[in-house]
Image (tube, coloured by chain):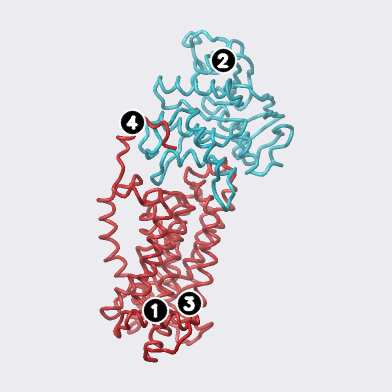
Chain colours: A cyan, B red
């Protein structure tokens, strides 16, 4: 089980600070949404957690072990990241995309074994993309593609799933489908989930805990009723909070 | 993995005509090996002097496998097969394998279906090196290689190193920066080549011959120098197939899948450049193989690098050995012309006619 701890984490792109002194703990089995206006540092936070941010300061520990002491491959076995969008230069079948999630587990020379194939099949079933098997992933709709990428991350079998705006560009039905899936993966399969979201309504409705970032700082952390209270929404997002459906 | 497919979905998936080949890399590999052997034997038997196939096989068995029994063939046949044709066939195969695997590697590394082994400056560097060697009034040789081959090899490696170094200083995203730097450096070197050709006078023909590629000068010494480089480079590339797989979804995803992206890219790029340099130094600039063979293999078995890399080497070898045979039967055409004239229509046919589930 994965326990994530951040102490005084900062990140800057040149002179422009992207994250300032962020401290928080995410316990195994939690389901957490990260919200904030554009440029608030949401993606930077994700990059820090995924270990791909350069020049990060402060401490991040995964189960007590500093992130920088873990080999990339070890980290990839513990923590999976669902990318926002990918471009596919070559024809590739849906099941082949999902199988890429096994790369950190495969024997580098002998390639995928029975356990890897099993994990791919399980992930495809779990995410419900069986009907897409055999199709060229480039021909999928955005919603279908998002589900396939989630299946890839599930096949990676890390205890921790990070998602960067998994519902962006999706129609309402697919947004709900993805949210329900994340809830299931969290509640039934015990995955710890941290998702960057733009839609405050989705965050409030589907996530028991919300982190609010503004200008690189963590300005609120708690259940949506507290973290997304009307006064906060108005201050951070500069919108009339009545535009937001009642949280909870 | 097909369990659970709804009947309607299965019908819509429309099995292609080449259903047997698709997803069956072993069948494809068998076909490739068979083609390689047949093309190889034809290359040994056919030529200005045709040698019966039985004699050709007997000579090979006798000399290479120490098959017992007295020779029943003329001594000249043995010289032709072993000293003239065998090194030429082997060199064509090695160069074809090099171009196939380097092309597949660069397409994957650059995530660009238009990439080929020459895209990062190797071709223009090698061409300029070879042209300078033609102009220099020197007769230098090393390990049975002429000055032209040595300078072509060096030129290819210097050019790709230059591209790599310069691209790291570029402000663009790493892949775009790399491609554009390759294009810019290539243009600069091509200008140098143009000057060399302009100044070459009567020696222009030699330079043009290099640019079109040929195996007419093949020798055992060349085989001995080029093949180990290509074999070792190709083997290490094939063993790092999963790097290319991880890069299918981009740099960031590759990092999330546990890859040290910058280090791996530098390593694979270096190996592909080495293998390409060995190929262009011995055979000149042979186009088309490195671009198209990986696409044909991808059409048949999909983008997985574990199959793509070895099969691209195999099919590149068979294709180039066949092209060289066609090039020398009518009396020494440049092989680069044959690869394009024979290969391009075949590729267009594949693009139009074959449905494998991995269309471009």
Residue that extends furthest to the right in the rendered view of this protein: A64
Q: Which residue is mark 3?
A: B223
Asked which secondary structure carries label 2, the reply is helix
Question: Between residues A88 and A110, which one lies in front from this camera angle?
Answer: A110
Q: Would you call the spot at circle 3 few (<14 residues within 10 Å), some (14-19), or many (20 or more)?
A: many
For this view, does B211 lie left or right of residue B150? left
Image position of B267 with respect to A93: above or below: below
Looking at the image, tell me whether mark 4 or mark 1 is earlier in sequence order: 4
Mark pair 3, 2: CA separation: 73 Å
Q: Residue at x 35, y 80 (%)?
A: B54
Task: Mark 3 vs mark 2: tell me if same chain.
Answer: no
For this view, does B351 lie left or right of residue B251? left
Q: Nearer the viewer, mark 1 or mark 2?
A: 1
Question: Between residues B283 and A218, which one lies in front from this camera angle?
Answer: B283
Asked which secondary structure carries label 4, the reply is helix
Looking at the image, tell me whether mark 4 or mark 3 is earlier in sequence order: 4
Splitting the image into 4 quarters, where does residue B73 fall? bottom left
Mark pair 2, 4: CA separation: 53 Å
Q: Which residue is mark 1?
A: B57
Residue B207 on image: x %, y %: 36, 77
Q: Are marks 2 and 4 in contact (CB under 8 Å)?
A: no
Task: Mark 1 vs mark 2: tell me if same chain.
Answer: no
Mark pair 3, 1: CA separation: 21 Å
Mark pair 4, 3: CA separation: 55 Å
Q: Nearer the viewer, mark 4 or mark 3?
A: 4
Asked which secondary structure carries label 1, the reply is helix
């Amino acid at each position: 089980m994965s326990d994530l701890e951040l102490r005084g984490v900062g990140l800057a792109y040149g002179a422009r600070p992207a994250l300032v002194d962020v401290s928080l703990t995410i316990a195994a089995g939690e389901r957490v949404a990260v919200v904030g206006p554009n440029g608030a540092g949401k993606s930077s936070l994700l990059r820090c957690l995924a270990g791909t941010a350069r020049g990060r300061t402060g401490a991040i520990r995964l189960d007590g072990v500093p992130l920088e002491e873990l080999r990339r491959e070890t980290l990839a076995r513990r923590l999976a990241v669902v990318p926002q969008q990918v471009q596919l230069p070559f024809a590739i079948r849906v099941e082949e995309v999902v199988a890429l999630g096994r790369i950190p587990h495969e024997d580098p020379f002998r390639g995928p074994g029975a356990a890897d194939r099993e994990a791919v099949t399980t992930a495809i079933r779990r995410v419900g993309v069986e009907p897409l098997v055999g199709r060229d992933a480039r021909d999928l709709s955005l919603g279908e593609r998002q589900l396939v990428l989630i299946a890839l991350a599930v096949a990676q079998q890390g205890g921790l799933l990070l998602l960067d705006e998994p519902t962006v560009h999706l129609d309402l039905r697919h947004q709900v489908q993805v949210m329900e899936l994340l809830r299931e993966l969290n509640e039934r399969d015990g995955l710890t989930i941290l998702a960057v979201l733009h839609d405050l309504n989705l965050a409030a409705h589907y996530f028991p805990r919300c982190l609010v970032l503004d200008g690189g700082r963590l300005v609120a952390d708690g259940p949506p009723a507290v973290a997304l209270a009307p006064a906060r929404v108005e201050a951070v997002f500069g919108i009339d909070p009545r535009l937001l459906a009642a949280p909870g | 993995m097909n369990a659970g497919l709804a009947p309607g979905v299965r019908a819509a998936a429309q099995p292609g005509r080449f259903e047997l080949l698709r997803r069956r890399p072993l069948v494809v590999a068998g076909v490739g090996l068979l083609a390689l052997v047949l093309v190889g034997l034809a290359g040994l038997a056919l030529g200005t002097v045709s040698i019966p196939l039985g004699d050709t096989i007997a000579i090979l068995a006798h000399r290479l496998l120490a098959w017992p029994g007295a020779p029943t063939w003329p001594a000249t046949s043995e010289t032709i097969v072993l000293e003239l044709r065998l090194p030429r066939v082997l060199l064509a195969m090695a160069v074809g394998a090099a171009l196939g695997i380097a092309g597949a590697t660069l397409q994957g590394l650059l995530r660009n279906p238009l990439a080929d082994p020459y895209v990062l400056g190797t071709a223009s560097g090698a061409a300029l090196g070879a042209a300078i060697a033609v102009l220099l009034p020197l007769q230098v040789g090393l390990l049975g290689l002429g000055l032209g081959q040595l300078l072509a090899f060096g030129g290819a490696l210097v050019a790709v190193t230059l591209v790599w170094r310069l691209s790291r200083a570029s402000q663009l995203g790493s892949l775009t920066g790399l491609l554009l730097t390759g294009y810019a450096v290539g243009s600069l070197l091509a200008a140098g080549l143009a000057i060399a050709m302009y100044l070459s006078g009567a020696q222009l023909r030699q330079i043009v011959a290099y640019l079109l590629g040929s195996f007419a000068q093949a020798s055992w010494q060349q085989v001995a120098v080029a093949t180990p480089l290509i074999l070792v480079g190709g083997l290490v590339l094939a063993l790092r197939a999963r790097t290319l797989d991880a890069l299918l979804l981009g740099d960031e995803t590759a990092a999330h899948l546990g890859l040290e992206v910058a280090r791996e890219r530098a390593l694979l790029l270096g190996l592909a450049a080495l293998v390409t340099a060995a190929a262009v130094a011995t055979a000149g600039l042979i186009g088309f193989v490195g671009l198209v063979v990986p696409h044909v293999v991808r059409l048949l078995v999909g983008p997985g690098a574990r199959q793509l890399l070895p099969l691209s080497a195999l099919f590149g070898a068979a294709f180039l050995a066949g092209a060289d045979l066609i090039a020398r039967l009518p009396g020494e055409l440049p092989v680069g012309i044959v690869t394009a004239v024979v290969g391009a229509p075949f590729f267009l046919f594949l693009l139009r006619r074959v449905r494998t589930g991995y269309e471009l």
